[in-house]
Amino acid sequence: MLDHPRLVKAAESLDPVPISVTRLLAVVARDNWAFTDVEQVISLDQALTGRLLRLANSWAVASHMPVGTVKDAVFRVGIGPVVSFATAACVGPSFRRALPEYGLSEGRLWRHAVAASLGAEVLGAMSPAGVPVESITAALLHDVGKLVLARFLTPDLLQGLADARATGDRTAMQAEVEVLGVHHGELGGLIARHWNLPERLAEAIAHHHAPEKVADVVCDAVHVANIAARLVAGPPPLADADVQPSPGAVERLRLPANFLDRLTAHVGRRLEDVLARYDGATEPIRVRAAS
């Protein structure tokens, strides 16, 4: 078992995301938000404005004129991707690091995170339940707890996790709880709260492997998007249960029987293009972890 107070302290040692990101998420988490509110928050952050304009213009095609204002950029890109992109600009460098403790080479966690955010975006169009736009950012950040937890995984604990997964049909989360006494989702929720992100988003991150605990469509969308991302971008599932959507989440999202095939096809088609756009429009901003 790990020392829970030390884990909490390590989770709270991560540098906060920029205030513009927390303000954006607070805006879109409201029931009645307006594009003018989003425009105002972005316009006050010169670096974010520049990145967003580069992103919007990277989507330009022959029928689109280049955009030069925040308002036009938001309309072109879409509010959900804009908020996710703003978050990605600050967490991307940390997510690109290798996490050998989880079998992830450099860039693999980032690839999975972007695939999950795409999955949540597609679910917003696929689900008649009304998936809130903050689901895209929650999906992007759903594995942030791994950045902290990996630092505590000694060879003995890693062997214990491997043994737990090899016995029975435990999910990755079940193995973490059994061996470590905590799972990466729980730590991710702590990090999200430390960053003053909306509670609904923090709950979705904390329970993305067990959506029945909150029974909320944001968490449901992150749960399903994570499964789609695993199937498209890895890492490979450790057990069949790792890629079995919760029946309750599927029901709350009101998804059709063949939704997973359609979802993974959409994500697979868009992933490389979106990764290239993110990398081309962002500048490194390190989210440092205290030693």
Image: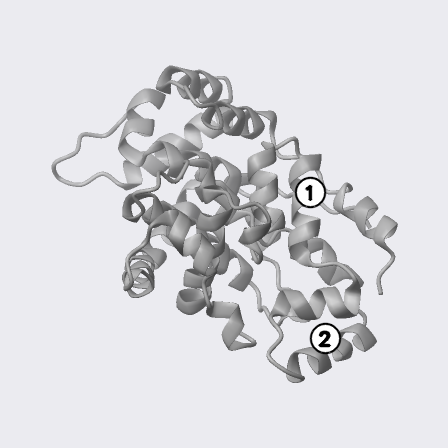
Disc 2 on helix, strand or loop?
helix
Amino acid residing under circle 1: Ile
Q: Residues within 10 Å of mark 1 (few under 14, many from 20)?
A: many
Disc 1 target residue: 191
Left or right position of 153 against 42: right
Q: Position of residue 41 (x, y in %)?
A: 48, 19
Residue 161: mark? 2
Q: Identify the residue at horizontal 69%, vertical 79% (top origin).
A: 162
Q: Position of residue 165 (x, y in %)?
A: 66, 78
Q: Residues within 10 Å of mark 2 (few under 14, many from 20)?
A: many
Quarter the N terminus occupies: bottom right
Q: Quadrant of residue 269?
A: bottom left
The colour scheme used to paint the residues is one colour
Residue 216 lies, with reference to residue 108, above or below; the image says above
Q: Identify the residue at horizontal 30%, vertical 60% (top origin).
A: 259
Residue 156: mark? none
Give the camera-side residue of 231 and 67.
231
Q: Which is more N-terminal, label 2 or label 1?
A: 2
Tally the marks. Answer: 2
Q: Identify the residue at horizontal 70%, vertical 59% (top origin).
A: 183
Q: Position of residue 278 (x, y in %)?
A: 42, 46
Residue 82 lies, with reference to residue 97, above or below; the image says above
Disc 1 on helix, strand or loop?
helix
Measure the alpha-carbon separation of dots 1 and 2.
Answer: 23 Å
Q: Identify the residue at horizontal 40%, vertical 32% (top origin).
A: 52
